[in-house]
Amino acid sequence: MADGHFIWSPLLGIDNLFRLGPDGREWRSRMGPMRVSRMRSRKSARGFTLVELLVVLLILSVLLAVVIPVVSQQSDAADVPRVASDLTGIRDGISLFKTNVRQFPDDIEDLVNRIATDGSDKRLFGQNYTPADRQRWQGPYLEAAIPNGTAPTAAALGTAFDASVLNGLVCFDANATADSVAIAAGSACATAVNNDLTVFVTLRLVGMDSLEFFQVNELIDGAGETNPRKRGRLRHGLFGAVDTVYYLAVPIPK
């Protein structure tokens, strides 16, 4: 073999390159372990190729396409029981308030802060609370406080689906079939009860669309409820307000 031609044996490895001299003798290469190590370092330091990067990006995009919808669906699914839980918690607070104070409140704030007797807080039927009412108050009946504000949506409790439970409570005739079934708190509510109507202390929610309503309604009233205007505890689509939901919380004794 001509002088200067290297021969490499796969059995010996790169550290054992040799060439044959003119006399046919084996002549070891001067390439030592240090030089070989540098060659290997340069090879490993070249990084990823463009094809390898594209493959990695493709895998990441596929994973994101699968994970993001799953997380979103889980978040939406969690909103349904949260709304139901919030409504149930307020309902239970109203019931316990009635047991202690022997009156119904006209807003949710009365469940959080001790009621006043100066007229700033009212009973559901419109009268001022008495000192005896205040003494019987054993709350808070809810953990959350009502934000300050004069707008209806400002005085509200936040819940899931970006909806809010309005602070003010109303009366609702459960047997009415027309849209004009909500009765404002105050003397009109007392009159409705005196007329033997089936009246409920009722919560109002705003910011909930029809799809979200039917998801919550299935949990509260059951899958068989098909007429949300006339039946069930949860009512929707009344008075032309498509984003307002009524929850008939506590029946008022006749």
Image (cartoon, rainbow, N blue to C red):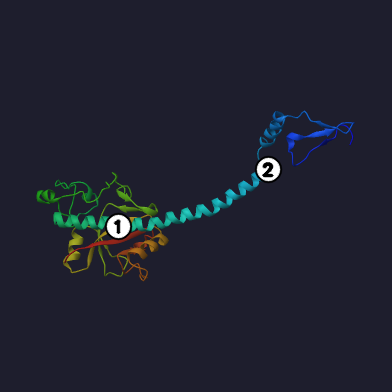
Of labels 1 and 2, the one closer to you:
2
Q: Secondary structure at mark 1?
A: helix
The residue where tag 1 is placed is: 87
In-image side of 142 versus 241 (left or right): left
Res 181 label: none
| Residue type, numbered disc 2 | Leu
Question: Above or below — where is 149 with respect to 219?
Answer: above
Q: Quadrant of the N terminus?
A: top right
- CB atoms at circles 1 and 2 under 8 Å apart? no
Q: Residue furthest left?
A: 132
In-image side of 186 versus 213 (left or right): left
Closest to the observer, 121 or 71: 71
User: Where residue 115 sits: x, y (%)?
Assistant: 17, 48
User: Where residue 250 sits: x, y (%)?
Assistant: 23, 61
In-image side of 136 versus 204 (left or right): left
User: Where residue 95 sits: x, y (%)?
Assistant: 20, 58
Question: Above or below — where is 94 with respect to 53?
Answer: below
Q: Residue at x 31, y 67 (%)?
A: 232
Closest to the observer, 235 or 55: 55
In-image side of 35 versus 152 (left or right): right
Q: Residue at x 47, y 53 (%)?
A: 71
User: Where residue 208 sits: x, y (%)?
Assistant: 38, 57
The residue where tag 2 is placed is: 50
The image quadrant of residue 184 is bottom left
The image quadrant of residue 198 is bottom left
| Residue type, numbered disc 1 | Leu
